[in-house]
Structures are given as structure tokens and as C-alpha cells.
Amino acid sequence: MKKYRYAIIAGCCLALLVLISIPVTKTLSSLEGGAPAAGWTLYPSSGGYQLNLVSGGTKVSDEAETEGLGSINNSPANQAFNKMTARQHNQFTELSANTIKLAKDQPVSTFSIDVDTASYGFLRTALNSNLQPTKDAVRIEELINYFPYDYQAADNLQQPFKTTVKVLPCPWNPANKLMHIGIKGYQLPQQTRPKANLVFLIDVSGSMADANKLALVQPSLKMLLDNLNADDSVAIVTYAEQVKLALEPTKVRDKAKIINVIDSLHTDGGTAGGAGIQLAYQTAKQHFDAKGVNRVILATDGDFNIGISDPKELKSFIERERASGIALSVLGFGMGNYNDALMQTLAQNGNGNAVYIDTLNEARKALVDQAGATLFTIAKDVKIQVEFNPAQIAEYRLLGYESRLLNREDFNNDQVDAGEIGSGHTVTAIYEITPVGSQGRMIDDLRYQANPADTANSGTNANEYAQIKIRYKLPDSNNSQIIKTVVDASQQLTDWQQVPEDVRFSVAVAAFGQLLRGEPTTKNFTYQNAIDIAQNAKGSDPFGYRAEFINLIRLAKALPVTAAGN
């Protein structure tokens, strides 16, 4: 053997060089999205990472963990690197918080309704993973609108919602007040729901291989099937490197056939999302129901890398297609390569909504408990315009809705797209307002201009705080209608305990969102203050949504302050 020992050593060295040359990647369970490329991959294990050779996203070996060769210790430095890397791969649109406005200079505030809730689901996943969500992932209006509220509802479909307004103390700034606007959509009775023509557009590319992606999409869609009527129809389009009509439109009464196709899905290859969207719309058009609901439901992590992938191109395509009467809703999955920016673009321009699904409980909430709101639109192109009276209100600031702001002239332009409200949806908007004469003013009067009191309205409307106008279109109309509500002292509550529980709870959520974003407007308000308000306003919580929220505040409170907004 001695004469062969140099050959054996040389062979071993060559094999080692080959192994070293194979790229190493990390897989962080739910924290890092995407299927691992061929090569060595680090899989989390107790006390460290297990080194395994993978091919095309499949784990080849699953040997016992060791602390020696083949394992890399999960040190604090490595944990920090992993968290940083996981967050950097997610994509969000940059948001700048709304600034304080002088009512005498800019008395009018205009924005589009938003009923998306994706931001809440994402930050829940991040906090449960001991990660502080990046500030652009925190959209305050989506946190608030995640929760159902018991606002007064409309009693007919012709005027599909009512407006409830309260003026109340501001808990983070006692010198100011909050103007709380609550809207609840008309609830369609089950027997009067229109037929649904749905196309499930499912991403089956390699990046969907994680347990919190396609494996979660499948039971989620089966939950939705259970809430559809027998005469509703479902088609399935899939996309990876190739696009495929996996199931022709099929009546829900043939549920076993639909479920069989859903269960047979598997991941592979690239992500031709643009071509998938085109085929989905084409399928929906071919089976269009003029008297029903026609909707594409996209389930994806948002990773488009083949064909049309530029958000601007996709936005233009979706804008053209929505004129056909086909809406697009987006179900987001996964974390690590989650492309929230793209999915928001698709949903907002597709007359649909965006939901982030991280658990089966969230799938049940969005697709079973709130299926009517998700699928059946009762009002479209809904816009809100608030005019503040400078005689009463010196300054104001809208909490959230940064990505939904509109120009003043857009309010009366029926060609400008806006948000949709589904059956039974609740929508909340909150303004922080500074009364005239308050010590809480942040903007000084100018020396060489008249004071607000000199130029403000002195007529019959002088005591009004504001006027709220809501413009909307019925689902089958292209002409808008308007609802007007005047706000004055009669809607003001001076004692915090007089404020309804739902209103107080939504204020706690708004405060939490500002704290997560690191906004200085909350002054000395703390996570504990938010916990106290939410705990005392939890009220009836049959599904545990509010209890879960309170726990999320506790998790955020426990994280290092330096992590906020990074």
C-alpha cells in the first residue's frame, strides 16, 4: 500500500478541492425564501447548521448533526448575519411618513381607500422570528384594517356603507386630538352573492419550494373551495419556467377534481409570472360571467424572473385588463425573497386586495371568515376627501395611507383609479389634529401673513371641524356617487373611557405602527402604553386576533431598540 499512498493522498486532495469549489448557500427555514441552488447548503439544526449537498433545491443528505466537520456553529455573529441577509432579500416600496399640514395652507386631504392587510401578516412573521420588520414593511393603515370592527353598517347595496366619526383625546400627545373615521361595508347575504368565475394563478417555481409557500398555498385554496357555492367555477393556471392551464374552468360541485389538481402541484424551475398572469386573464375572459364576479387570485412570493417582470410593465398590463371587468387579488407567501413591492403594484392596479398568508389560521381568516370581503366587491374606486376648517383646526396629520395619497383634483375625476371595498369590509382612517389655540402646534405662524383667525370662515359653518366626503362607484357603474359627513363638537368625546372599545383598540394599533416605524411624533409614548390601551380595549375577541396583537407588541418591546427601522 505504501507505493500507492501518494496517489491516494493526491486523489483525496483533488476530491477536497472539488467539494470546496461547490458554492455554499444558507437556508433559514421560513426566514430565507427561495429554493437553494445546487451545492452545499446550511440547514438550521439545534445548536448549529447542518451542511448538506443539495441539487436544485432538494436536500440530498439528512445525516445526524455533529459539532465537528460538516457543521457550522450558529454563533451570535452568524445569527446576526442570517437575520440581516433574510431581511435584505425582501422587497418593499420606500415610504416616507405623512408630514404635519397647516390647515390654512392645505385644508384638503385626499386619499384612496385601502383594505389590504399584507403588512400585518409580514410583521407578525418577522416578530415571531425575533426580527424587527424594516420600516417600509410597516403600513399603518394595513395594520389597523387587519381587524374587524363593529361600526354601523349600511342596510342596502345602493349606498353600500356608512361613516362613523369620533373626535377623541390623542394618547401620545395630550395637546392634540384624533379624528377617527370608521366605514363598514354592506354585508351581502350568502343567498344573494353573485356567481364566481375564479382563476387560481399559482406560482410553482423553485422559489416556492419552502414549507411556508406552495405547501401552504395548497390547503389555503382548499379552504376557499369550501366557502364557494356549487355553481361557482374554478380554473387553475400554474407557472414556473413554463405556463400551464392545469385545470379548465370546473364547477365547484366537482370539488374532488379541483382538489386532485391542487394536491398534484409541485415546484420546479424559473418564474414566468408575467406569462402566467396573461394566461390567467385570457382564461377568465373566455369564461366571463357578465352577471357574476370574475377574479384572478394569484398565490406567489412575488419572485418574477422570466418574461414580463418589470413592475411598470406589469402595472400597465393590469390597468388595461381591469377594464374588462376582471379583478386581481394577491395572496403573498414566504419570507426572504418576498416581493411585497410587486404584489402591492399588482393588487392596487388590479381592483383587488393583497393578503399575506403565513399560517393556516391566516388562510382561514382571509379565505373563509372574510371570503365575502375578499371576493365580492360592493363599491369600487372609493376615495376619501377631508376638508379641515382653519377656524377650528390649526394642523393635521394623516396616519398611514402614504402609498394611497391622491391629488385634490383626483377626487372628482372618475377616470382616476382608487380602492375597492368588499362585502362586510371595515375601513378605518385616523387623523391627528391640533385645535386652534392648542399648545401642541408644531408649525409657527408666519410674521408677514395673516393669522388663521383673521381669514377663517366666520359664517354658519364656523364651528365645524371638518367635512368628510366619500366618492364611490357601484360595481356595475362607471359613474360615481358621493356621501358627505360634517364633523363638529357633537362627535367629540372628552373622556377617554367614553371612547368605544373598537376605536380605542384601533388607536393602539396606530400607535404600535408608528413605534415600529420609529416616528418621532409619538413623543414619549412606549410599547407598554400601547399594550395597556389594547389590553383594556380588547373586548370580544372570538378568534384571538386581538390577543395575538398584544403579544406582538410584547415581542417588539423585547427586541433591541437599535433594530428598529434597519
Image (spheres, grey):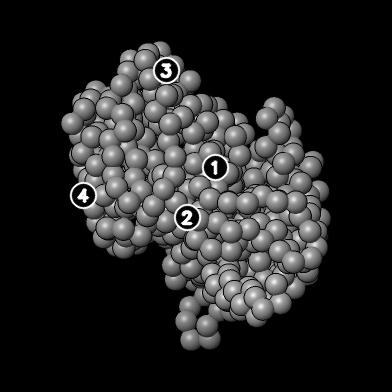
The residues tagged by marks 3 and 4 sit, at their Cα atoms, a distance apart of 35 Å
Kind of residue at disc 1: Ile
* Mark 2 crowdedness (10 Å alpha carbons): few <14, some 14-19, many ≥20: some
Q: Position of residue 497 (x, y in %)?
A: 77, 41
Q: Residue at x 28, y 44 (%)?
A: 243
* Mark 4 crowdedness (10 Å alpha carbons): few <14, some 14-19, many ≥20: few
Does dot 3 land on a helix, a strand or a loop? helix
Q: Residue at x 55, y 48 (%)?
A: 210
The residue carrying mark 1 is 357
Does dot 2 land on a helix, a strand or a loop? loop
The residue carrying mark 3 is 256
Q: Is residue 553 above or below residue 253?
A: below
Kind of residue at disc 4: Arg
Q: 190 or 152: which is nearer to us?
A: 190
Find out whether the residues at labels 4 and 2 contact each other: C-beta distance under 8 Å.
Answer: no
Which of the image's four quarters has the N terminus?
Answer: bottom right
Q: Residue at x 62, y 34 (%)?
A: 361
Does dot 1 land on a helix, a strand or a loop? loop
Q: Earlier in the sequence, mark 4 or mark 1?
A: 4
Q: Residue furthest left?
A: 286
Q: Which label sits on residue 320?
A: 4
The residues tagged by marks 1 and 3 sit, at their Cα atoms, a distance apart of 24 Å
The residues tagged by marks 4 and 1 sit, at their Cα atoms, a distance apart of 28 Å
The residues tagged by marks 1 and 2 sit, at their Cα atoms, a distance apart of 25 Å
Disc 1 vs disc 2: which is toward the camera? 2
Q: Earlier in the sequence, mark 1 or mark 2?
A: 2
Find out whether the residues at labels 3 and 4 contact each other: C-beta distance under 8 Å.
Answer: no
The residue carrying mark 2 is 56
Asked if residue 201 can be seen in this view, the reply is: yes
Q: Earlier in the sequence, mark 1 or mark 3?
A: 3
